[in-house]
Each structure stands twice: as C-alpha cells, then as structure tokens.
Image (cartoon, rainbow, N blue to C red):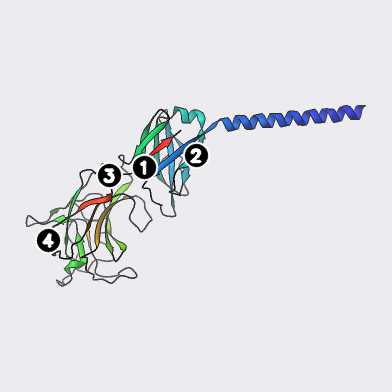
Amino acid sequence: MIRKMILGALVLGFFATSCSNDDDAVVAASTTSGLTVNLEGLEALGDDFVYEGWVIVDGNPVSTGTFSSVTFPQTFQVNTAQLNAATTFVLSIEPAVDSDPLPATTKILAGDFSGNSAAVNSNLVADFSLVAGTYILATPTDMDDTNESSGVWFLDNSSGSAAIGLTLPTLSSGWKYEGWAVIEGTPVSTGTFIDASMADNNAGTSPFKGDAGNGPGYPGEDYLQNAPTGITFPTDLKGATIVISVEPSPDNNAAPFTLKPLAHMVPSDAMDHTAITMGTGPVTSLSGSVTR
C-alpha cells in the first residue's frame, strides 16, 4: 500500500510539473508578436555588415532583429507590449559583430506607426529630389594631353573657370557620397566625399591618378595607372556610365550602394574639357512597409 501511494504521488507530481511547463510555454509564447517587414530596393551589404530593425518605445530603441537577406517579406518576433507601444520603426546598418546595444548612426529607413502599420522611406538619409550634376572629361594629374578622355571631374567650367559641379543635399551622419565610372561593366571609384565643393577624401593617395599633382579641388579621378584586373588605363570614358552614389560609412563593399541619385552615360561624341550635364540616377529613394 505504501508503495502504491508513493507511485501515485510521483505520477501526480509528473502531471503537475508537465502542466506547469505547458503553462509557462503558453505564457512565453504570448509575450511576443510578429513584426512583418516588407522593403523595396535594398541590396545586400558587405560580409561585415547586417541590417537591423528597431522600434522606438517611449523614446528608446528596441531591436527587432538583424538580417542579411534582402528577400521580403520577413517576420520577426518582438515583445508584444513593446511592439504595441512602439511609435516608429527604424532600419540601420550595423557591424555583423557588434557589442554596441544602440543603433549605429547609419540609419537608412524610418517611418511612424499609424495603427498597426508604418510606411517607411529613406528621407532621413537626405532628400534627393533636387539633385543636379555637371562633369568634364580631363586628366589634370599628368602632363600628357593625348589621354584627356581617361579622367572625370565633377566640376562646371562653362563660365570659363572651375566651379562646383554637383548640387547635392547634406547627408545625415553615417553616410558619404562616392563617384564612379562604370568601365566595361565594372564600377571603378572616383573617390568618396562629403562636400562637392572640395576634393575627394583620397585626392592625395589615389592609386589611379597621374604623378603631376592631385588635380582640381573638386571630386573626380584620372584613370591613368594601376588599373583593376580586366581594365586597361589610360582608357576612354566615352560610352561609360558616370554615377554618384550614397554610401554607408564605414563601407567594405567594392560596388556602389543602392542609392544612386545621379547617373549619366558619357556621349560617344563628348568633348574633353567641356561641361556635360548629368541626369537623375536610377534610385533616389527607398521605401517599404512594416506591419505589427
């Protein structure tokens, strides 16, 4: 009889424990809810970076998770109380290995919740609706005047003297501009810059420029030496596409980022040292929706 009582107590204890575990699981499951992210135009980042979503709750950022895939929609589990209280969704670019619990300065999309959804866009980077650009073909960093079509400089000399060639908005923190020449299908950087009235950040250290100085004090590049594999320098930029992109900073991707507010294919009959007008680029803004 004693043995039966002991066995009965063990069985009851087992069921009590099982029920308790089940109840805990139900409670745990009910503390999170799905946040569905559906974004357009994002491109994959370099290997060292990821996208990270955030909801703003009482003025504080709460991570909704990181992702590398740019196939959407994607759904993330977020604390239900925090998700219901969230007022804004923000998407940032973060180091893949990141010890900082706060969002990086490189924020790319944001939008306020209206009910259970938020329309997000890239306006927090900058408004590119009024961009304009002018460039010339020239190679001022060497003494050879036979290869002038192998350099591109973002300046306007139509008045007879060099002037700023790019009308671009000031970028938010964490972003920079970068010029490119797409040569035989390969994008080759002209350098990065923040202010279009000043030279590139690498004006004095560019591996491509000639040996007769750094060129004018504006963004641009001479493609004269140390050509990337598969390309020959000097080259002829007629037929190439000239691009201004917006890049996250820091950035380890050798290709242009998604945002490209200015672009132009150099005409086959383009004259060197003559101002050429750029057009609007293929991607001036990003958008999407977030649903809770």
- Upstream in the sequence, badge 2 or badge 3? 2
Q: Residues within 10 Å of mark 2 (few under 14, many from 20)?
A: some
**As shown in the figure, which amino acid type bears the numbered disc 1?**
Lys
Residue sitting at x 59%, y 33%? 29
In the rendered image, which quarter contains the N terminus? top right
**Residue 186 pos. (x, y %):** 32, 63
**Residue occupied by mark 1:** 107
> Element at badge 2?
strand
CA separation, marks 2 and 3? 30 Å
CA separation, marks 2 and 4? 53 Å
- Upstream in the sequence, badge 3 or badge 1? 1
Residue 203 visible from this viewpoint: no
**Residue occupied by mark 4:** 274
The correct choice, above or below, for 122 with respect to 226 in the image is above
Residue sitting at x 77%, y 31%? 14
**As shown in the figure, which amino acid type bears the numbered disc 4?**
Thr
**Residue 188 pos. (x, y %):** 30, 62
Q: Which mark is residue 76?
A: 2
- Upstream in the sequence, badge 2 or badge 4? 2
CA separation, marks 1 and 2? 19 Å
Say left or right for 152 vs 58: left
**Residue occupied by mark 3:** 171
